[in-house]
């Protein structure tokens, strides 16, 4: 009986250690996601910052920016589509700041971050001044250490 209790205790300890390790990995990924995403919005952002952000994503990443993008499907060229869209807006801001407000870890499948940000600049398409301040929550799904789905919600 003592052997069974010891084995059961060891299994439980290993399981709890793996949950702690998974949470730590997701916490690190959440911090990387936020810092690299913010770097892509900076006035002096380059393709280097963009590629650092994209390195966190799967090739078939899905992205949904609610209410602007109602489709939440993943596509084989998801990362390439994000690269193209983000390149269009690269360095459009003359001012940008963001503050991480909360991080939420969901077992080993994802995380969410809530942040406030302020941006000012010139829209690259219509060349009109833009300025906005918002609080946003990004809900992120993760598979095999890569981000596979990004959902952005505005408060």
Image: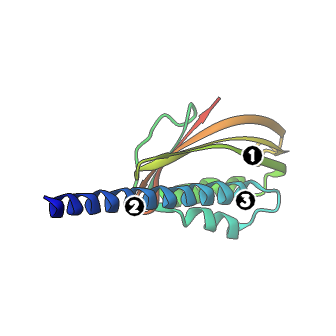
Image marks 1 and 2: residues in contact by CB distance under 8 Å? no
**Image quadrant for the C terminus?**
top right
Q: Earlier in the sequence, mark 2 or mark 3?
A: 2
The image's mark for residue 99 is: 1
* Left or right of residue 154: residue 9: left
Task: Where is residue 96? Give x, y as percent.
Answer: 81, 49
Nearest the eye: 110 or 48: 110
Residue reaching furthest bottom? 48
Characterize the local packing of mark 2: few (<14), some (14-19) or many (20 or more) Cα atoms within 10 angstroms.
few
What residue is disc 2 on?
Answer: 17
Query: Quick one: quadrant of the N terminus?
Result: bottom left
Earlier residue among tags 1 and 2 = 2
Please report whichever mark, 1 or 3, sits nearer to the chain's N-terminal start: 3
Report how far apart the C-alphas of labels 1 and 2 lie in the structure.
31 Å
Closer to the camera in the image, 9 or 20: 9
Residue that numbered label 3 is attached to: 39
- Which element carries disc 1, helix, strand or loop? strand
Which residue is depicted at the point 46% across and 49% down? 110
Q: Residue furthest front?
A: 2
Up the image or down, 110 lies above or below 83; here it is above
From the top left corner, tell me how far across and down residue 37 is, in percent: 66, 55
């Amino acid at each position: 009986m003592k052997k069974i209790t010891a084995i059961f205790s060891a299994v439980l300890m290993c399981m709890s250690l793996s949950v702690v390790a998974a949470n730590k990995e997701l916490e690190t990924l959440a911090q990387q996601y936020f810092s690299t995403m913010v770097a892509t919005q900076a006035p002096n952002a380059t393709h280097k910052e963009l590629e650092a952000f994209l390195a966190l994503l799967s090739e078939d990443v899905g992205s949904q920016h609610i209410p602007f993008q109602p489709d939440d499907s993943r596509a084989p060229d998801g990362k390439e589509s994000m690269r193209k869209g983000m390149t269009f807006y690269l360095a459009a801001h003359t001012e940008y700041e963001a503050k991480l407000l909360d991080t939420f870890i969901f077992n080993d499948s994802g995380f969410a971050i809530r942040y406030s940000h302020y941006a000012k600049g010139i829209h690259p398409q219509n060349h009109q001044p833009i300025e906005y301040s918002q609080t946003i929550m990004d809900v992120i799904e993760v598979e095999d250490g890569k981000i596979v789905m990004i959902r952005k919600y505005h408060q």
